[in-house]
Amino acid sequence: MTVSGQMENNAAIALPSIAGGDVSIFDVPLSEATAENLAGFGQLETSFEAAEVEIVTWPAPGWRPIDAGTGTGGGVTSGVFEYWHEGDVFRARNLAVDGDYIIGWFADPARASNESTTADVSRVLVCEANYHPDSSQTFFPRDTGPFVALLAKPGENIRPEDFIAFFFDGRFGVTIRPGVWHQPMYPLKSSAVFDGKQGRVHACISCNFVEEFGCYLSVPLRRR
């Protein structure tokens, strides 16, 4: 479960306020999603069916190696990844792993409302990202609509300035490499459906930007 998912299941968790000066905003740069720009992050996919999920061998706890042909038996899981706006809240549901998430806000998260009809959807505020050490992950839009992927290269000492927002025009999907920091995709439409697949183990390691760096990441959702 993501940090945002934990917030969804515990209404008592208070979000720090931008207007109140509790936290700042870090503007993430936008880049076109090309094969060259995605090097080290992942790759473009022209077909969901042809995209391959890389399964990482289970790590050996000591000096004895994992036996050949073992440590990858978790396999791959696939399913629909749904996205929608709910007032000021950006939500997502990953049916492949039974995940239900809040993936960002269009207003000050401390004051965001599910009932708002005036949300500025030109950017989304994000409080966390995670990576999967066990596998790569594929996202492919069903309606060829444009979307943005928030990504950072592998590494434990991650910082806000390491993140890039990649703009996809919707003609391609993406497979992100194991260990790449990410959030679910951010479709530019108010609702969208993607096909997704990833390792069945679904291990997650997360970074909370608010707790670690005192900021929300502002992710642009349109070409500049």
Image: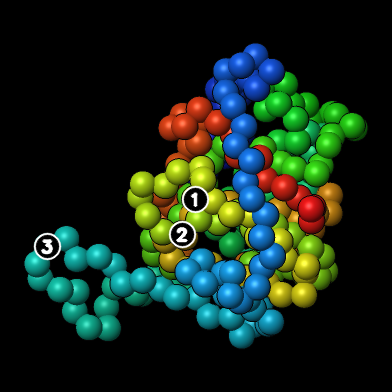
In front here: 88 or 224? 224
Measured along the vertical axis of the image, is residue 130 above or below residue 178? Answer: above
Amino acid bearing label 1: Asp
Distance, label 1 to label 2, CA atoms, is 7 Å
Image coordinates for residue 136, horizontal then vertical, percent: 48, 69
Amino acid bearing label 2: Lys
The residue under the point 59% across, 69% down is 37
Q: Would you say residue 140 is visible in this rendering?
A: yes
Which residue matches tag 1? 162
Image coordinates for residue 60, horizontal then vertical, percent: 19, 66
Amino acid bearing label 3: Gly
Measured along the vertical axis of the image, is residue 191 above or below residue 15? Answer: below
Q: Would you say residue 90 is visible in this rendering?
A: no
Task: Indicate which disc, 3 or 1, sits on the residue closer to the N terminus.
Answer: 3
Q: Residues within 10 Å of mark 2 (few under 14, many from 20)?
A: many
Which residue matches tag 2? 153
Q: Are marks 1 and 2 in contact (CB under 8 Å)?
A: yes
Q: Is residue 105 left or right of residue 161?
A: right
The residue under the point 31% across, 72% down is 57
Q: Report helix, strand or loop for mark 3.
A: loop
Image coordinates for residue 17, horizontal then vertical, percent: 63, 20
Which residue matches tag 3? 62
Q: Report helix, strand or loop for mark 2.
A: loop
The residue under the point 11% across, 62% down is 62
Q: Quadrant of residue 58?
A: bottom left
In front here: 60 or 75? 60
Q: Quadrant of residue 32?
A: bottom right
Task: Indicate which disc, 2 or 3, sits on the residue closer to the N terminus.
Answer: 3
Distance, label 3 to label 1, CA atoms, is 32 Å
